[in-house]
Image (cartoon, rainbow, N blue to C red):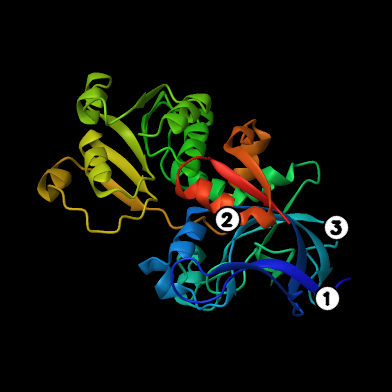
Amino acid sequence: MNQMMKCVVKERPGPGALKLTERPIPAYGPTEVLVKIKAAAVCGTDVHIMEWNEWSQKRLTPPSIIGHEFAGEVVAVGDLVSTIHIGDLVSAETHIVDNTCTLCHNGYQHVCANTSTFGVFRDGCFAEYISLPAENLIVYDKSTPVEIVAIMEPFGVAVHAAMEFPLAGRTVLVNGCGPIGVMAVAVAKKCGAAKVFAVELNEDRIKMAYDMGADMVINPKEVDVVKEIKANTEYGVEIVLEFTGNVHAIKTAIDCMAPEGKMAAAGLPEGSVDFDFAEFVYSGKVIKGIAGRLMYKTWEDAKGLLAAGVDLSPIVTHTLPLDEYEEGLRLMKNGECCKTILIP
């Protein structure tokens, strides 16, 4: 095996500063595995790292390999690894937790206070190889397309949000139809939602939302979202799945909720969200934060949904060689793709 690999590195703090370069193939410990990357997906987080926003500045210490969504083949395992085998097709839970804190001990590993995230806090998967703890790997049937396995991590966010509250027979509003939002549309339909509304500005994403099963997509540039929702429901929607991270859109979605309505919120606004708290209390509404995926229940739910027929193939709109990572980031930044896959 060649001891060097190509990879995309954030070389230094500041906007840009990404470079396709070579580094040694990573070592792996007794409880870790070495994975050869078959496909890696571009995420909005990778764009934030490129732009060096405040979130990135607080978390990433360059130089570091970026990327955290992938499919790969296990090529080596540590001496203490017994659950993962050479040749397995795998993806991985992004968050590496300590399993020693009170949160982990109570089953809340997904919000572990001592989380380390690969592709952010440690080297990621925009590379030919990655080493990770064996406990983080999820094994897939080898017949599963690598492009689908590569997007299972973001699919998990959609699954976690959509399955936080029972959807069968309920009216559902998916707020924002980026990659995770349109996947949530598909999950809501598969879980038996009575009617799935979606809110989106981008025309390509509006079409994608319909393709994934939305009953009605509302463009807030053209109509009043609250009036449209109230005109097509008895009191408003029963469930909101929020993915925009846009302060105004979040406040609008709260206004769209029926009394006793529930919101699963995965979008991250840059500012605070103010709303009529008294009205919120008196109407019995609920907002639940969605942090990543439940470890590891969500991954099993996601596998089950694939087996039940959820088709994620329309989500992958572009495939590029790793060398063209800049184009992949540009497509994501400009909203010109759903998911772009990079092939090392």
- Residue topped by disc 3: 87
Q: CA distance from mark 3 to mark 2?
A: 30 Å
Quadrant in the picture for residue 129: bottom right
Q: Residue at x 20, y 37 (%)?
A: 255
- Residue topped by disc 1: 3
User: Type of residue at label 1?
Assistant: Gln
Compared with residue 140, is residue 233 higher up or lower down, i.e. above or below?
A: above
Which tag is nearer the camera, tag 1 or tag 2?
2
The spot of residue 92 in percent (x, y) is 65, 59
* First in residue order: circle 3 vs circle 2: 3
Disc ID at residue 209 = none
Q: Are marks 1 and 2 in contact (CB under 8 Å)?
A: no
Which tag is nearer the camera, tag 1 or tag 3?
1
Q: CA distance from mark 1 to mark 3?
A: 20 Å
User: Type of residue at label 3?
Assistant: Gly
The spot of residue 169 in percent (x, y) is 41, 26
The spot of residue 211 in percent (x, y) is 52, 25
User: Type of residue at label 2?
Assistant: Glu
Q: Are marks 3 and 2 in contact (CB under 8 Å)?
A: no
